[in-house]
Image: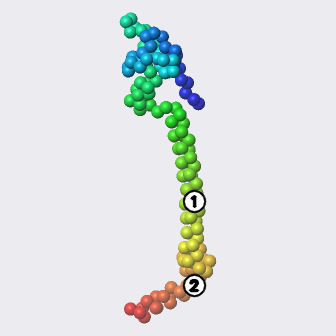
């Protein structure tokens, strides 16, 4: 849900500035093409409190504000990266399955599923290997 800009209504973004039409921070004059934030406050001997768009941007950066368009772009990129990560997870699972099947076929070439199956199939093999071990000591 998009966040409402200026929910309190305290500030206005204007190009037509009241007199005196200067940024209170940098002194930039309003020419009709410059944007200013009007605080809705006027002071005696000063006039309207206006801050130009450039000074507003500088203030926002000072407090680590991220403009909405940059935040939206970052969110889109995060979603793209999360999708890529999920795809890579699926690739790893598929590779793990292939590698497991390969090693299983090398360890149990006769189609046996485990060591227990090979021990159950031939009880004499343990006796024969014990005898071989004794002979070759």
Q: Vertically, is 45 above or below 30?
A: above
* Left or right of residue 89, residue 51 in this image: left
Q: Quadrant of the C terminus?
A: bottom left
Residue farthest along the bottom direction in this orientation: 135
Instruction: Tell me, yes or no, whether the two marked residues, 2 and 1, touch with CB atoms within 8 Å.
Output: no
2 or 1: tag closer to the N-terminus:
1
Which mark is on residue 3? none
* Left or right of residue 42, residue 122 in this image: right
Q: Residue at x 44, y 21 (%)?
A: 52
Alpha carbon distance from label 2 to label 1? 39 Å
Total number of numbered discs in the rendering: 2
Instruction: Residue 64: name its quadrant.
Output: top left
Residue farthest along the right direction in this orientation: 111
How many residues crowd around disc 2 within 10 Å: few (fewer than 14), some, or many (20 or more)? few
Q: Nearer the viewer, residue 43 or 8?
A: 43
Q: Position of residue 110 (x, y in %)?
A: 61, 80
Q: Is residue 117 visible?
A: no
Instruction: Residue 116: name its quadrant.
Output: bottom right
Which mark is on residue 122? 2
Q: In front: mark 2 or mark 1?
A: 1
Q: Position of residue 120 (x, y in %)?
A: 57, 80
Q: Position of residue 91 (x, y in %)?
A: 57, 59
Q: Quadrant of the N terminus?
A: top right
Q: Nearer the viewer, residue 41 or 32?
A: 32
Which mark is on residue 91? 1
- For label 2, the SS is loop
């Amino acid at each position: 849900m998009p966040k409402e800009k200026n929910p309190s209504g305290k500030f206005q973004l204007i190009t037509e500035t009241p007199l005196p039409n200067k940024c209170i921070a940098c002194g930039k004059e309003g020419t009709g093409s410059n944007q200013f934030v009007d605080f809705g406050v006027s002071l005696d001997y000063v006039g309207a409190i206006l801050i130009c768009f450039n000074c507003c941007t500088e203030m926002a950066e000072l407090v680590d504000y991220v403009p909405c368009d940059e935040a939206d772009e970052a969110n889109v990129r995060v979603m793209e990266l999360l999708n890529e990560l999920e795809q890579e997870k699926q690739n790893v699972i598929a590779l793990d399955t292939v590698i497991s099947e390969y090693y299983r076929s090398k360890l149990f070439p006769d189609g046996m599923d485990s060591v227990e199956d090979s021990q159950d199939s031939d009880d004499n093999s343990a006796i024969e290997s014990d005898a071989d071990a004794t002979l070759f000591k």
